[in-house]
Image: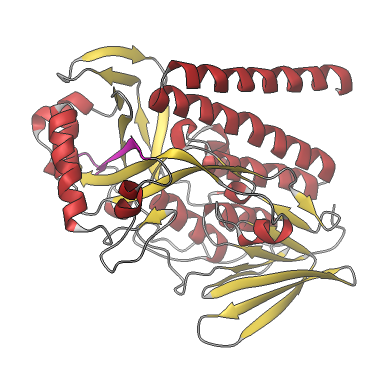
């Protein structure tokens, strides 16, 4: 695609932005990441991540540290109300955390040393481009002028600035401002439920509960709703038993216009949040109410986990997908959650980011056209998004809602199969 080094601006400094930054930097392009967070470090996102195939492949190919970053879950187990195992699926998965991946990626992108990755990975190999991670920059506009893109931004310290670039990667997450600029009519749709999330240090949980969970991904189905748990690396990425974290996600239904949801998402200062109620912002009476609910509704090991959580947070679940990934004749690309937002049930958000970056690497090497890149990214986004709706509806809303979404998913699979048969 590129015969000479490109100047690339990446909007968004989380996992998707860093993955693309590493790929492009290693290929000799100069990469400038603009991140709206006011500090150079992002902290305590609190999210567990299942490292699916593309994530594993990305770190195998692009992580110079070559250090372990995940925990192996030998299978998936389902509990009844008495905490007895009623079903198991023999599926081996790798689990990790947002914090571990972020600091590992930063070490590979711009040489950041941290407690998660203390060794220095700085020192560009021959042929690598420059890497800049620029915090406190909120992008306000992208203009296509004279075959270059101009990225305009506000600076948290006052004033603003602009970058003239050959390529813009929009990796600014599920609430992407770039996507909104390009497709103002596209809306995110609330799925009808939220995820209560939290972690507890493994050694703070009773021995009895630890034996129930083991290192297994564990589910409990309610009516409606469900909760799941898996083990992730602990503080500073520790993989040592006892120092790891037990990470849970508890899905509960709330209608979009309900007073209950509005109350839930109103923080300690009276501010109503639309997407995520961050750690440290939950009102005490709301959390006390949820802990009481956990004691009454969940198996004892899950209830213990919830009641011992010190920093819970809440995420509203949304569906969103762009119909395009490439704009301005391929000079602006939507990637990761900015391209499509999945429900968490399929654990594919980070996998999508890794896939987008790996495919773009092929484009830059001349092994794939940009049109093929867009087609494959959109196909993955469509099928994965529909599959996430199927699983969400099955666990949250019952058989008939699940059946309708399964029919749409099946139709999409059939259409993709027919297109491959007809067009290759």
Residue at horizontal 53%, vertical 41%? 349
Which residue extends farthest bottom? 159
Locate residue 313, reporting x and y percent. Answer: 31, 52
Residue 424 on the magenta span: no
Residue 295 in the image: above or below residue 128: above
- Comparing 360 with 279, the one in front is 279
Q: Position of residue 88 (x, y in %)?
A: 33, 14
Position of residue 31 relative to residue 356, above or below, is below
Residue 246: quarter of image: top left
- The reply to whether residue 14 is visible in this rendering is yes
Q: Residue furthest top?
A: 86
Magenta residues, start to end: 240-254
The quarter of the picture where the C terminus appears is: top right
Overall secondary structure of the magenta section: strand
The answer to whether residue 402 is left or right of residue 308 is right
- Looking at the picture, tell me which residue is in the foreground, 360 or 290: 290
Task: Say left or right for 410 vs 50.
Answer: right
Which quadrant holds residue 296? top left
Q: Residue at x 54, y 62 (%)?
A: 13
Return the residue found at the far right.
Answer: 146
Residue 247, magenta (yes or no): yes
Q: Position of residue 17 (x, y in %)?
A: 59, 57
Residue at 46%, 55% in the rendered image: 102
Q: Please tell me which residue lies in front, 267 or 261.
A: 261
């Amino acid at each position: 695609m590129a015969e000479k080094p490109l100047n690339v601006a990446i909007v968004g400094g989380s996992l998707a932005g860093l993955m693309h930054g590493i790929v492009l930097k290693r290929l000799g392009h100069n990469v400038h990441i603009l991140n709206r967070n006011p500090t150079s470090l992002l902290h305590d996102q609190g999210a567990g991540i299942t490292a699916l195939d593309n994530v594993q492949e990305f770190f195998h190919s692009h992580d110079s540290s070559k250090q372990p970053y995940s925990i192996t879950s030998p299978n998936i187990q389902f509990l009844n109300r008495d905490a007895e195992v009623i079903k198991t699926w023999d599926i081996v998965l790798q689990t990790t955390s947002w914090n571990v991946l972020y600091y590992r990626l930063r070490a590979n992108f711009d040489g950041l040393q941290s407690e998660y990755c203390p060794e220095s990975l700085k020192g560009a190999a021959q042929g690598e481009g420059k890497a800049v991670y620029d915090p406190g920059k909120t992008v306000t506009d992208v203009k296509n002028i004279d075959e270059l893109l101009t990225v305009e931004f506000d600076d948290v310290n006052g004033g603003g600035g602009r970058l003239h670039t050959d390529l813009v990667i929009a990796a600014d997450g599920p609430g992407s401002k770039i996507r909104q600029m390009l497709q103002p009519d596209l809306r995110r749709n609330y799925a009808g439920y939220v995820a209560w999330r939290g972690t507890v240090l493994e050694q703070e949980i009773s021995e009895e509960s630890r034996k129930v969970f083991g290192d297994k991904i564990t589910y409990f189905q309610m009516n409606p709703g469900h909760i799941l748990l898996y083990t992730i690396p602990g503080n500073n990425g520790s993989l040592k038993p006892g120092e790891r974290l037990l990470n849970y996600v508890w899905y509960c239904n709330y209608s979009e216009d309900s007073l209950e949801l509005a109350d839930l998402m109103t923080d300690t200062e009276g501010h109503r949040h639309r997407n995520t109620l961050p750690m440290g912002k939950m009102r005490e009476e709301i959390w006390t109410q949820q802990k009481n609910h956990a004691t009454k509704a969940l198996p004892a090991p899950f209830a213990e986990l919830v009641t011992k959580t010190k920093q819970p947070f809440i995420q509203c679940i949304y569906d969103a997908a762009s119909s395009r990934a490439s704009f301005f004749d391929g000079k602006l690309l939507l990637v990761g959650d900015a391209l499509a937002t999945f429900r968490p049930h399929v654990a594919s958000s980070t996998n999508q980011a890794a896939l987008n970056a790996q495919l773009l690497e092929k484009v830059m090497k001349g092994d794939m056209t940009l049109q093929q890149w867009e087609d494959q990214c959109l196909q993955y986004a469509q099928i994965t998004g529909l599959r996430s709706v199927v699983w969400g509806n099955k666990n949250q809303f019952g058989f008939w809602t699940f059946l309708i979404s399964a029919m749409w998913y099946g139709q999409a699979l059939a259409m993709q199969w027919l297109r491959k048969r007809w067009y290759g």
